[in-house]
Amino acid sequence: MIEIKDLHKSYKTGATKLHVLKGLNFSIEEGEMVSIMGSSGSGKSTLLNILGILDEADEGSYTLDGVPIKNLNEKIAARYRNKFLGFIFQSFNLINYKSALDNVSLPLYYQGLKRKQRLEKGMAYLEKVGLADWADHLPNQLSGGQKQRIAIARALASEPKVLLADEPTGALDTKTSYEIMNLIQEINDEGKTILIVTHEEDIAHMTKRLVNLKDGVILEDSFIEQKMAKDYV
């Protein structure tokens, strides 16, 4: 599903060059649930941006569901993001003046669905995350956990191949974090490929595979015994 080979990325900082990713090699099979850990400056955010087609590597290759991701103009990059990827963010990234249902339905607008279809599909995904009764509420009327559930429903609505989650529990208390991870585990059990960037050890161990980054290289890449979030809720 995801394959990267010899991936390098550098940034210019004044007169110097900062080599952030130093020849990464790894692949993710369909249906895997993988966490990427690393301290600040390890390169995990840069890697996520490249995987999310928000940035491009200097060297190496990135293949997503058999499609080479290289030298894309913004229009094609946006189309690929909408087709292949669902994003979950620490800060939820909901539109404050739109209802929960409209937030979930938004990606479907870019897929060209008519409003009636968008709302029907959006409601189905709200039901999936247990928030159908909150469809008309605005984000400021929701708790942090509810906002993240809305964000997950939005990420799923476009039926992406891969979910990319950037610190999805970073803004939540422990109990709510585990409730969100339980939902994410259920989605993975249905066959969705999920990649989670986190700095939290307990969250990482709720995935099935752990990739540890340090200074732009992979220190560890191992399958782990998954802790089930429902056991901690």
Image: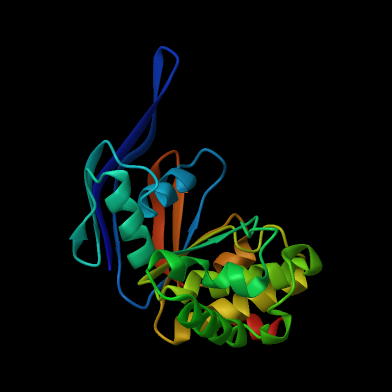
Q: Can residue 178 be seen in this view?
A: yes
Residue 121: x %, y % from top left: 49, 83
* Horizontal side, residue 115 vs residue 149: left or right: left
Image coordinates for residue 71, horizontal then vertical, percent: 22, 43
Residue name at image x 56 percent, y 75 percent:
153
Residue 206 appears in the figure: no
- The correct choice, above or below, for 36 with respect to 144 in the image is above
Which residue sits at x=20%, y=61%? 67
- In the rendered image, the vertical position of residue 22 relative to residue 63, given as above or below: above
For the C terminus, which image quadrant? Answer: bottom right
Q: 185 or 103: nearer the eye?
A: 103
Residue at the image position 66 percent from the left and 72 percent from the top: 100
Image label count: 0
Question: Which is nearer the eye, 75 or 1?
Answer: 75
Residue placed at 42% from the left, 73% from the top?
158
| Residue 150 image point, x, y percent | 63, 72
For residue 97, which quarter of the picture? bottom right
Quarter-of-image position of residue 82? bottom left
Residue 173 vertical placement versus 21 (above, below): below
Counting from the top left corner in percent of width and height, residue 87 is at 49, 62
